[in-house]
RNA sequence: GGCCUCAUGGUCUAGUGGUCUAGGACGUCGCCCUCUCACGGCGGAAACUGGGGUUCGAGUCCCCAUGGGGCUACCA
């Protein structure tokens, strides 16, 4: 088998769409699986979409995710340049060659002319639109003369109007299409830059790409590319077209709703490994029942056979679960480090031992951005209603809550050493002495300490974190509330 | 409109003619653990889009219908 060379060819639009990233991931995995090369190429032939700093976004995501490329604009390689706008002369040369080979012709029609012809056709609604281009009949000499005279022109692909073109895709199988349904698209624009339709063929060939991984949107234009390969007499690469990732309802993931880019998830506190793991599984099945794979493991497990044909809906719930799995797999210290920035958003009080908070939150966190609202009560006791003290299953009501809170206040106040075990023993002794259920004491105490219905950790852990003075203060507040109900 | 393409529970999927009374995971529901929540454990509900063929036998092959997606740009 010859060397596997795959490429990731994003356009610098300023953000990394998650579906696009997945395509890059698969290209990377395929290369790694077979010990090949993964190449980064920048497709910036559309000047109108140029965005400042967008290439850095691409580098950054690749670096963060660990999809390390072997060749690319920043690190070079034997087949550069790797930025399409720097390959102008190359495209021009091949476009000229294609004219000679009969695979293309010079076209002087304006966009407007073609658009109006299309409109006219659409009114009739009769069969596929095919532009009957007068320029096709021009001789090369005539055309070149008009070019000399300064007319604006493009290179347009010439496609045989009879016959069919068949190609094989690794995931979709064999596909045959009537040549007559293929339109003769622009190869080189009047600004001298190529369109995707031309650049992808030239670059993939010159860069010796063995497997072309790209989205399904290119499936129907692939025959046009093969006609180009054939015109040049070049070997056709293996094609791997990947289905789309959609959101609920089969709609496209959108940039505007903040659910489409890698950064959107990264900034919300999703772990890189979890994101990669999740998107790898969206459209690819590893074969067994295992679902947790880090990048390294994916490299070994990946296979084209596991790729699916239908588009997959992005399910944030499953990502959340996976992210939680990765969080729980970390040590408490590792978690603590990741959680720290999120603690800062909710807690300013320097007396709170954040390590203890981490012990509580470690198994209770799925996404890091959920942290602040989970622990805001530690910073400040929220307003709460005394209804909270009444809990059927805990067998608590206003009366016994008040009584037990008073007991708790007294015994805790007399405590000299304030730590988890001391608090625990102290409270448990009282429970035993009074002959009540754990919950009848602990539920009111936890309520008084937190003012919340749900908290990470119970009364004892919270009291420990809050410290003696603050704990007693909050219990006192609870007692007052219940007395003045 | 034309062309291409896809189709198993709510979601991601396994299934390549008999082993399918359709398997796993997320989610969901119930129970257990338990001072709340979570973690963990156990259990439940939930799917082959429809119709025709082919075959002794079809989720699996073929055709049609329906529904979804894509392309139809001097965007990629």
Image (cartoon, rainbow, N blue to C red):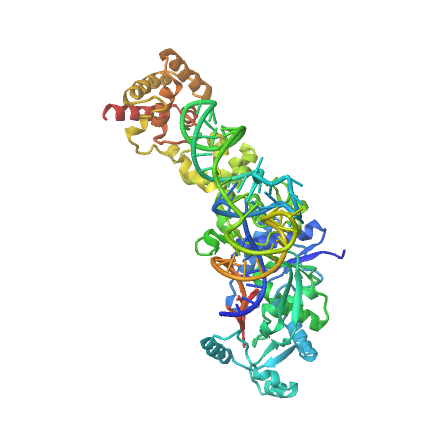
Residue lying at the far left of the rendered structure: A484
Q: Is residue A316 visible?
A: yes
Q: Position of residue A189 (x, y in %)?
A: 57, 75
Judge left or right: residue A379 versus residue A244.
left
- Residue nearest the observer in this picture, A432 or A290: A290
Judge left or right: residue A180 versus residue A110.
right
Tell me what residue is drawn at x 45 percent, y 42 percent.
A369
Q: Compared with residue A367, is residue A62 higher up or lower down, i.e. above or below?
A: below
Q: Is residue A13 visible?
A: no
Residue lying at the far right of the rendered structure: A1
Q: Name the quadrant of the C terminus of chain A.
A: top left
Q: Compared with residue A469, is residue A9 higher up or lower down, i.e. above or below?
A: below
Tell me what residue is drawn at x 64 percent, y 44 percent.
A287
Q: Position of residue A46 (x, y in %)?
A: 54, 68
Tell me what residue is drawn at x 59 percent, y 87 percent.
A146
Q: Compared with residue B16, is residue A416 higher up or lower down, i.e. above or below?
A: above
- Residue nearest the observer in this picture, B72 or A93: B72
Tell me what residue is drawn at x 26 percent, y 24 percent.
A482
Q: Name the quadrant of the N terminus of chain A.
A: bottom right
Q: Position of residue A3 (x, y in %)?
A: 74, 56
Q: Quadrant of residue A343?
A: top left
Q: Position of residue A388 (x, y in %)?
A: 32, 29
Q: Compared with residue A125, is residue A253 higher up or lower down, i.e. above or below?
A: above
- Residue nearest the observer in this picture, A324 or A391: A391
- Residue nearest the observer in this picture, A38 or A307: A307
Q: Quadrant of residue A416?
A: top left
């Amino acid at each position: 088998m010859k060397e596997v060379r795959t490429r990731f060819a994003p356009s610098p639009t300023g953000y990394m769409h998650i579906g696009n990233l997945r395509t890059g991931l698969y290209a990377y995995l395929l290369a790694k699986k077979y010990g090949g090369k993964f190449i980064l190429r920048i497709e910036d032939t559309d000047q109108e979409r140029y965005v400042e700093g967008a290439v850095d976004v691409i580098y950054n995501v690749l670096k963060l995710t660990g999809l390390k490329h072997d060749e690319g604009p920043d690190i070079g390689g034997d087949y550069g340049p790797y930025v399409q706008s720097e390959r102008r002369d190359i495209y021009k040369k091949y476009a000229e060659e294609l004219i000679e080979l009969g695979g293309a012709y010079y076209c002087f029609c304006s966009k407007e002319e073609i658009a109006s012809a299309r409109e006219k056709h659409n009114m009739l609604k009769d069969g596929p639109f095919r532009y009957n281009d007068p320029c096709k009949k021009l001789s090369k000499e005539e055309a070149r003369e008009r070019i000399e005279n300064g007319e604006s022109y493009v290179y347009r692909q010439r496609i045989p109007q009879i016959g069919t073109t068949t190609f094989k895709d690794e995931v979709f199988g064999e596909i045959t299409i009537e040549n007559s349904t293929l339109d003769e698209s622009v190869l080189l624009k009047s600004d001298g830059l190529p369109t995707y339709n031309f650049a992808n063929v030239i670059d993939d060939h010159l860069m010796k790409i063995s497997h072309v991984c790209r989205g399904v949107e290119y499936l129907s234009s692939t025959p046009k590319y093969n006609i180009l390969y054939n015109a040049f007499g070049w070997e056709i690469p293996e094609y791997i077209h990947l289905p789309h990732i959609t959101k609920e309802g089969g709609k496209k993931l959108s940039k505007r709703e903040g659910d489409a880019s890698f950064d959107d998830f990264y900034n919300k506190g999703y772990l890189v490994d979890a994101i990669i793991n999740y998107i790898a599984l969206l459209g690819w099945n590893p074969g067994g029942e295992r679902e947790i794979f880090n990048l390294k493991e994916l490299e070994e497990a990946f296979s084209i056979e596991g790729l699916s044909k239908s588009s997959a809906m992005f399910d944030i719930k499953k990502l959340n679960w996976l992210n939680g799995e990765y969080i729980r797999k970390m040590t408490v210290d590792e978690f603590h480090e990741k959680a720290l920035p999120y603690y800062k958003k909710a807690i300013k009080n320097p007396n709170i031992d954040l390590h203890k908070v981490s012990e509580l939150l470690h198994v209770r966190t799925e996404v890091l951005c959920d942290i602040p609202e989970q622990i805001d009560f530690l910073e400040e006791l929220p307003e709460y209603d005394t209804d909270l003290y009444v809990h059927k299953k805990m067998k608590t009501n206003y009366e016994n809550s008040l009584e037990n809170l008073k007991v708790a206040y007294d015994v805790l106040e007399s405590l000299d050493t304030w730590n988890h075990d001391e608090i625990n023993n102290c409270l448990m002794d009282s429970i035993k002495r009074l002959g009540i259920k754990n919950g009848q004491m602990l539920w009111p105490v936890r309520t008084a300490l937190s003012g919340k219905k749900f908290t990470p950790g119970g009364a004892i852990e919270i009291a420990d974190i809050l410290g003696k003075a603050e704990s007693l203060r909050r219990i006192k507040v609870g007692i007052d509330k219940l007395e003045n109900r």
